[in-house]
Amino acid sequence: MIWKRRSGGSDRSELLIDCLARPARLGELAPEQWDRLIPQAREARLLATLEALLAEQGGQGRAPGAARDHLRGAGLAAQRRADALEWELSRLVTELPGGLAAPPLLLKGAAYLAAGLPHARTRHCADIDLLVARTDLERVERMLFWAGWQPAGLDAYDERYYREWMHQLPPLQHRRRGSTLDLHHNILPATARRPPDPRLLLDRAVATPGLPGLTVPAPAHLAIHCAVHLLADTEWDKAVRDFHDLDRILRHYGAHEGDAFWQELVGEAVRLRCERPVDHAVRHVQARFGTPVPPAVAAALARRRPAAPVAGLMVRAVDGASRPCAGGEQPRRTRAWRALLFVRAHWLRMPPLLLLRHVIHKARVARAEGP
Amino acid sequence: MTATTANGLAADLAGPGLTLVTGPFRSRIRARLATVAAGLASLYPPDAFEPATGFADFHVALDRPVGARRWYRPQVRFRFDGREVFRPLPRPQAYPMLEWGLNWCVTTQINHYLLFHAAVLARAGRALILPGEPGVGKSTLCAALASRGWELLSDEIALVALDTGHLHGLGRPVSLKNAAIDVIRRFAPDAVIGATCHDTLKGTVAHLRAPRRGALQAADAACPTWLVFPRFIPGAPTRLQTETRERGFFRLVDNAFNFTTLGTLAFERTTDLVNRSTCLDLTYSDLEEAVGRLGSLRAVD
Amino acid sequence: MAVPQRWIVDPRVVWCRVGGSVLAYHGGSGDTHLLTASAGELLARIDADADRFAPVVDAASAAEAAAMTETLDALAEAELVHRVVPS
């Protein structure tokens, strides 16, 4: 393997990842370790996840009371958020038009919840992501508008940026309920070099029993979208959480559907032209979270891997950027990796000229809004 | 044992940091500013300071912004878990910034208590809760009551335990603003008031040291008994009137920090608190009279 | 004769007597509703007897039945109760 674990000093920042990978550790931590773990989990929004893992271990009694209090508070808040999200989805079902080319497809957190993934109820999810067929987009947007979903305040440039170049509309906010919704027509921007065909996701979508008219991605698509989103997105503070999602998705469907799931994962990654991000992400969770991936699957995904130096750089960049930095100054190295991935994420999304314009505009706005 | 003189605290704050124990929370603080050490030494009892070891709820630091002006209008920034959560303030406001920052930590990071924007005092284990937005005179009233025999639990944040519904002390000084500083100096000449800080976003501020130690141990909690909505109106006569419990509920929820976050549990705790309390509406202009009226409250049951 | 309607209280709803009223909290929407004492009583009756509560049958008079229907419609509007559609 090209990527090597750095020895010595990296232990501190890896505490959270180690605890996610080996939850049995949670029962053995000293107060000083909890003192580092809580801020790291707070930064990654994984406090409620840790509470659930600690409870599964039966190790609550061995954690300091004050640390447990933070986990409990986060657990209560997560429970309430999941209830609120379920309620919001039950409203949304009544607000969508009928007779669409394809039923709207939930993505990410809302999809995990609707698909009944065990970790979804403790997972932090701020808004609803919905994918609709390109041909349905206008109708869905109009119907939602009349139901109270309106664009959250954007300037004209942002509006155009979203509509012309992105894979989603500007975020919508419900006038009365205050919840937010991202309406997508693809899982990657139209300007991306290798945009996947969103119809492939819609065609194999799975119905949700409690939410007539809404669907969730097929298990392999859930995993693929998680991987693609992870490597194409720029929210690096939450990268640990996204990797944890992928680990949970792979474990869950790997255990419940076995070979059928793994075969579909490889096949669909190729069909959606996402082999490379899926390969990167799967290798990463395998190395860091100990996710059980059958060797044949790892080998099949690796077949389309780029030349060694590029692949090695990617793994190191992902690894470096996703290190938690809570409790101290963000290490310069982490910052550099995050910057590198930010550029890379935008590079994949946009042709170079657009990228330049976007960066210049954002820089101007930042200066205008600065102190 | 951690030193508790301003000099000793300054050395700890600039070095390994120190732990400030207030109510159920432990804050790990680092700062290289003499005003912060002096503020802490004058406003907290010696046993509130512990060495920087073990688990802490909050990790905060006050320091100079990177590349900031060193001599010309120097600034101070507040960091939580290593992240800057506010805009920097002028350096002389470092101490008030620490107090505001510690409040921010509780109101944004704590969900194992139900939190309300309220002053809380207690007498013989019975809590008087004074909810209110800034500007209703809640802190002044709170400082006055605390200097007349009421035990101070908190001047801005009511902590309601989720399992018992009891109110817990936050163990922090009272923040006084503008005219209230001199009002309290006249009202309670023995009061210990820390350094005055001018021209902050809230005007002039100074902190009143808790006259007696606030309920420091998590076990010291008070039962909700009186829920009083105060309002200072210049020239108004003192009126203490019954408020309906329904209105009391909604007025209290208007002052909640995490009611929405906690949902059903928050609803159950809040209705329980309201049902256990006598709900009253207080308008006043004469502090002495208002304190007298509240002092004569008796528990019904 | 119309089939009597049956009702259930939404499982996410909790309620509590406060002063002279009843406050009902919906754990999904996060809304708190202020109910009259009689609406609160109706909620409690439905909850206690979820299998057979049919208010129009249980009402003592036509006027009471009408009042109950009106209250139930308001409770249903707030999603505090649901009509059970006979299968």
Image: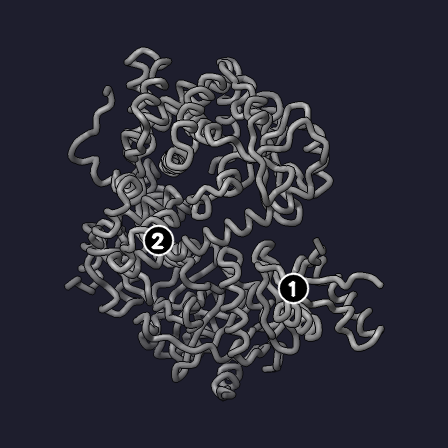
B53 left or right, relative to A225: left
Structural crowding at the residue carrying mark 2, measured as other residues with C-alpha within 10 Å and reported as few (<14), some (14–19) or many (≥20):
many
- Residue C87 visible in image: yes
Compared with A127, A72 (above or below) is: below
Q: Position of residue A60 (x, y in %)?
A: 29, 57
Describe the element under mark 1 as helix, strand or loop.
strand
Residue at the spot 42% in from the left edge and 73% down from the top edge:
B166
Instruction: Name the residue type under label 1.
Output: His
Structural crowding at the residue carrying mark 1, measured as other residues with C-alpha within 10 Å and reported as few (<14), some (14–19) or many (≥20):
some
Which residue in the rendered view is the most extreme toward the top?
A307
Residue at the spot 58% in from the left edge and 25% down from the top edge:
A203
Image label count:
2
- Residue B76 visible in image: no
Instruction: Name the residue type under label 2.
Output: Ala
**Which quarter of the picture shows residue C44?**
bottom right
Q: Quadrant of the N terminus of chain B?
A: bottom left
Mark 2 to mark 1: distance in Å? 44 Å
**Which quarter of the picture shows residue A320?**
top left
What is the basis of the colouring in this image?
Answer: one colour
Q: Position of residue B24 (x, y in %)?
A: 33, 65
Query: Observer-nearest residue: A216 or A262?
Result: A262
Please tell me the numbered disc located at residue C33.
1
Describe the element under mark 2 as helix, strand or loop.
helix
B23 left or right, relative to C20: left
Residue at the spot 19% in from the left edge and 51% down from the top edge:
B16
Q: Nearer the viewer, mark 2 or mark 1?
A: 1
- Circle 2 residue: B94
Query: Observer-nearest residue: C58 or A306?
Result: C58
- Determine whether label 2 and label 1 are within 8 Å by CB: no
Q: Position of residue A142 (x, y in %)?
A: 72, 34
